[in-house]
């Protein structure tokens, strides 16, 4: 009998957790705070101990520090919530797994990459790591799930008409974000959650990672710069230049790197790597990743943008919409072992999203907010495929697609490019 909450909404990661518990002695579920790690872990656990609970003067944490074995005893799989409060638990779990030799003994959810000081063993072969994110649109019930991303590679896209989604609705979904705790809140309540998240990050979470105090103003300026550069390949140098436009702020490259490292360790950022199609030609392929917040609602909050502001600045919202779709594409692809990239080369060719299958096939996708942008996007994709097909060393895309927000017709164009309403995607 697991500890599933009565109102638990199934998550795509559930299948992966189940599989890894059957394969490894323990599973570490990592991801940003408030993304639902504990609730998902409880769905698979038969007992739990809350290491960070303040009950009885943090008794559980004290027990774990005095003798980790005292908190490992319980029906398996046993959930050790916020185990990172006592990093030595990692080695205790690894040792227990070695001694018991059984699969699926422990689940360890964590919201920050722990400092390796005090940890003696990586846990390789014993403890697997899974990455969890905020809810995708199909998990939160905001997409129809009529178009399977995986099936597009093997089956023709059946034409159909779906319900249209307005610009205001896309703005609402982006501002709201995929935070499970706000899924049942009305919009005015839900839109305050990302701002509260960033406030907690600046005031407490960054310090708790390594005990180092940081300049709050500089952190806030970096977050704002990251937000302004959402879905772009801005370098650290570009971020610093952006921040230095405020004459009252002086920030060094080293400080930028330090702050970005902490934000990475808190799973706040998730960059989209560049795709290498293994072209053995003279073409130079860009290697810089696209920058993303783990959820586009955080970019909205960092900029202090309102729905009215986004409605009146569609160029900025276009980048945020792209981030929303790419967040979901990554989640969907990883459920079946796929990966998400972007493509850019020295000749100026670029593609918003590349989805690669485990067998090496890949698809090129442009992400557009309006239906009036489909024609130009399709032409660009067709030109890319023709160019790669003409190179004997190239690995051309298996499929081409334009994922569109304000579009309610799914179809295959005469040139073979798929037109996919963003509101219909699922794994």
Image (cartoon, rainbow, N blue to C red):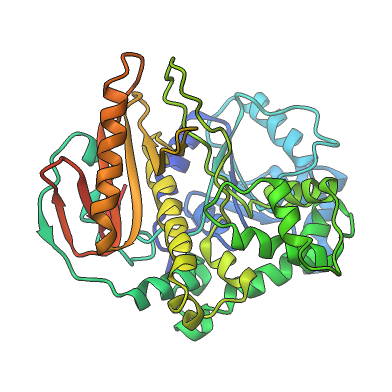
Identify the image quadrant of residue 164.
Answer: bottom left
Residue 137 x, y percent position in the rendering: 37, 61
Give 165 or 393, whichever is nearer the viewer. Answer: 393
Residue 269 placement, left or right of 183? right
Between residues 328 and 337, which one lies in front from this camera angle?
Answer: 328
Location of residue 93 with respect to 366 vertically, above or below: above
The image shows residue 377, relative to residue 297, as above or below, that is: above
**Residue 223, image x and y in percent?**
69, 62
Q: Is residue 174 above or below residue 226?
A: below
Q: What residue is at 82 percent from the left and 47 percent from the top?
A: 253
Q: Residue at x 44, y 15 (%)?
A: 280
Q: Is residue 201 left or right of residue 231?
A: right
Confirm whether residue 356 shows in the render. Answer: yes
Quadrant hosting residue 27: top right
How many numbered marks, from 0 up? 0
Q: Position of residue 362 (x, y in %)?
A: 33, 32
Q: Is any part of residue 53 visible from this angle?
A: no
Residue 341 percent across, percent down from the top left: 46, 38
Nearest to the observer: residue 280 or residue 331? 280
Left or right of 303? Residue 46 is left
Residue at x 16%, y 55% (from the top left corner): 410
User: Camera-side residue: 364 or 282?
Assistant: 282
User: Residue reaching furthest front?
Assistant: 347
């Amino acid at each position: 009998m697991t500890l599933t909450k009565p109102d638990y909404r199934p998550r795509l990661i559930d299948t992966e957790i189940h599989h890894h518990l059957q394969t490894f002695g323990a599973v570490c579920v990592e991801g940003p705070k408030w993304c639902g790690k504990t609730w998902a872990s409880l769905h698979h656990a038969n007992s739990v101990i809350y290491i960070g609970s303040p009950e009885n003067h943090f008794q559980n944490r004290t027990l774990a520090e005095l003798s980790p074995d005292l908190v490992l005893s319980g029906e398996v799989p046993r959930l050790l919530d916020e185990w990172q409060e006592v990093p030595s638990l990692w080695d205790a779990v690894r040792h227990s797994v070695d001694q018991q030799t059984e699969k699926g003994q422990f689940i360890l959810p964590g919201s920050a990459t722990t400092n390796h000081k005090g940890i003696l063993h990586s846990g390789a072969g014993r403890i697997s790591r899974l990455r969890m994110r905020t809810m995708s649109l199909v998990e939160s019930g905001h997409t129809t799930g009529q178009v399977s991303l995986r099936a597009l590679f093997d089956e023709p896209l059946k034409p159909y008409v779906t319900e249209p989604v307005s610009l205001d609705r896309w703005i609402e979904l982006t501002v709201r974000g995929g935070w499970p705790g706000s899924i049942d809140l009305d919009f005015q309540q839900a839109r305050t959650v990302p701002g509260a998240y960033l406030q907690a990050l600046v005031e407490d979470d960054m310090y708790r990672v390594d005990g180092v105090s940081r300049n709050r103003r500089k952190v806030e300026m970096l977050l704002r710069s990251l937000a302004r550069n959402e879905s772009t390949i801005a370098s650290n140098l570009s971020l610093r230049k952006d921040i230095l436009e405020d004459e009252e702020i002086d920030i060094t490259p080293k400080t930028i790197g330090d702050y970005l490292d902490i934000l990475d360790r808190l799973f706040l950022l998730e960059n989209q790597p560049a795709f290498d199609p293994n072209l053995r030609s003279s073409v130079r392929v860009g290697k810089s990743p696209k920058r993303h917040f783990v959820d586009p609602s955080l970019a909205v909050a960092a900029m202090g943008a309102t729905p009215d502001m986004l409605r009146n600045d569609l160029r900025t919202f276009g980048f945020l919409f792209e981030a929303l779709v790419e967040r979901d594409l990554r989640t969907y692809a990883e459920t079946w072992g796929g990966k998400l990239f972007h493509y850019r080369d020295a000749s100026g060719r670029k593609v918003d999203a590349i989805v690669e299958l485990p067998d090496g096939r890949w698809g090129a996708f442009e992400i557009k907010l309006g239906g009036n942008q489909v024609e130009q996007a399709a032409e660009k994709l067709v030109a890319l495929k023709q160019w790669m097909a003409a190179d004997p060393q190239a690995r051309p895309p298996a499929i081409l697609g334009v994922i569109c927000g304000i579009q309610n017709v799914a179809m295959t164009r005469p040139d073979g490019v798929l037109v996919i309403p963003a509101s219909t995607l699922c794994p």
